Image (cartoon, helix red, strand yellow):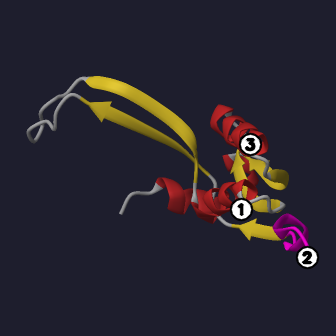
Amino acid sequence: MTDRADSLSRVICAGHVNWDVTLQVDRLPDPDGEACTDELRQSVGGSASNVAVALSGLDADPLLFASVGSDEYGWLARRELNLAGVETALVEAYTAADRPADEVERATTST
């Protein structure tokens, strides 16, 4: 009988990598009101990275194919994924200058 980890193939996860910021507030403010922040949590997120982290926890060998920003948050996301056992060799870091002009315009134009 083979071990479950030995029977799993490499899984490539392609999709989104996010850096999630969650704020806990002391109360739900009224419209246009204010609230105090009790706690701030930050963690890697995004559909593909969440699946890759879960697979790593099941002793699979996930490889993530995605992109992140070439800023502090992109660095933090890659670091957290590596610490969780996700291979990030195919996670590329990009700046706005790396993106086609029409894509940058769509991303910065509100509708």
Few, some or many C-alpha atoms within 10 Å of disc 3 (few <14, some 14-19, many ≥20)? many
Tag 2 and tag 3, C-beta contact below 8 Å: no
The amino acid beneath tag 3 is: Arg
Going 41% across and 39% down the picture, which residue do you hit? 22
- The residue identified by callout 2 is 1
**Seen in the image, is 18 located left or right of residue 111?**
right
Q: Nearer the viewer, mark 2 or mark 1?
A: 2
Task: Report the side of 73 relative to 10 (left or right).
Answer: left
Q: Is residue 103 left or right of residue 11?
A: left
Disc 2 crowd, CA 10 A, few/some/many (<14, 14-19, 20+): few
Q: Quadrant of the N terminus?
A: bottom right
Residue ID at (67%, 42%): 77
At mark 3, the secondary structure is: helix
- Mark 2 → mark 1, Cα distance in angstroms: 22 Å
Mark 1 belongs to which amino acid? Leu
Look at the picture and state if 2 lies above or below 80: below
Residue beneath label 1, please? Answer: 55
| Numbered disc in front, either 3 or 1 | 1
Image coords of residue 37 (percent x, y): 30, 25
* Quadrant position of residue 71: top right
Using the image, tell me which numbered label, if any, was put on residue 78: 3
Q: Is residue 2 part of the magenta span, yes or no?
A: yes
The magenta segment is 1-10
Query: Looking at the picture, how far across and down is residue 86, in whole percent?
Result: 78, 52
Residue drawn where x is 75% and y is 56% of the image? 56
* 23 vs 59: above or below: above
Q: Residues within 10 Å of mark 1 (few under 14, many from 20)?
A: many
